[in-house]
Image (tube, helix red, strand yellow):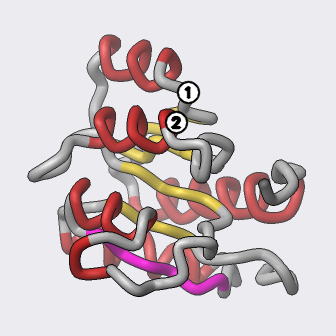
Amino acid sequence: MNTPGVGTILLVEDNPDDVALTLRALKKNSISNPVVVASDGQEALDWLFAEGAHQGRDSAERPAIVLLDVNLPKVDGLSVLKRIRADARSRLLRVVMLTTSREEQDVLESYSLGANSYIRKPVDFDEFIRVVGQIGLYWLLVNEPPPPA
C-alpha cells in the first residue's frame, strides 16, 4: 500500500507486544510505509519536534499518520495530542488514537483535543489485523491529507 510521497507512520506505543502485533498487522495488510516506534509520549514529542535524542533530525519530515496510545509513560497520549495540536508545524497531522482504553472520558477528551479518530484495539488477533488494515487503507490511501504548510 505504500504510495510514493506517502510517509512514515509514527506508532506511539509502550507495550512491546502491541508494537509487535501492530507491525505484524501492517505487514500482513501490505502496508509497507516506514514505521517509527516511540515507546513513550516524550520520545514521540522528541521525534516530532527534533528534540532530545532526535535533535538534528529533519523536523520538516512529518509522519503520514500518528497512531497514538492514550496510556503512556512519561507523557500521556492526551498530552502528546494537545502538544501536536498546539504547534503550527504539527496541528494538521492525522492522529488516530489506537488504545485499549474504554474510558468514556478518554474518548471525549481525545476528540475535544482534535483527534481524527478513536479506535479501541480489538483483543482478537484476526480482528486486530482487520482493523489495522482498515486504518491503513483509509488514512494512507483514501483520505486526502492537508497540503504541507
Nearest the eye: 45 or 37:
45
Q: Which contiguous range is marked in magenta?
A: 33-38
Q: The residue tagged with tag 2: helix, strand or loop?
A: helix
Residue 27, placed above or below residue 76: below
- Mark 1 is surrounded, within 10 Å at the Cα level, by few (under 14), some (14 to 19) or many (20 or more) other residues, namely some
Residue at image coords 48%, 67%: 10
Q: How far apart, in angstroms, are the residues tagged by discs 1 and 2? A: 7 Å
Task: Name the quadrant of the C terminus.
Answer: bottom right
Q: Earlier in the sequence, mark 1 or mark 2?
A: 2
Look at label 1 and name its amino acid: Gly
Residue at image coords 39%, 40%: 83
Across and down, in percent, residue 3 comes to 85, 81
- Residue 105 makes an appearance in the image: yes
Q: The residue tagged with tag 1: helix, strand or loop?
A: loop
Across and down, in percent, residue 53 comes to 23, 81
Splitting the image into 4 quarters, where does residue 32 fall?
bottom right
Residue 16, placed above or below residue 84: below
Residue mark closest to the camera, 1 vs 2:
2
Reading the image, the residue beneath label 1 is: 114
Residue 65, label in figure:
none
Residue at image coords 58%, 50%: 90
Helix, strand or loop: magenta stretch: strand
Reading the image, the residue beneath label 2 is: 85
Left or right of 136 in this view: 88: left
Are discs 1 and 2 less than 8 Å apart at CB? yes
Left or right of 120 in this view: 138: right
- Mark 2 is surrounded, within 10 Å at the Cα level, by few (under 14), some (14 to 19) or many (20 or more) other residues, namely some
Residue 99, placed above or below residue 39: above
Look at label 2 and name its amino acid: Arg
Splitting the image into 4 quarters, where does residue 19 fall?
bottom left
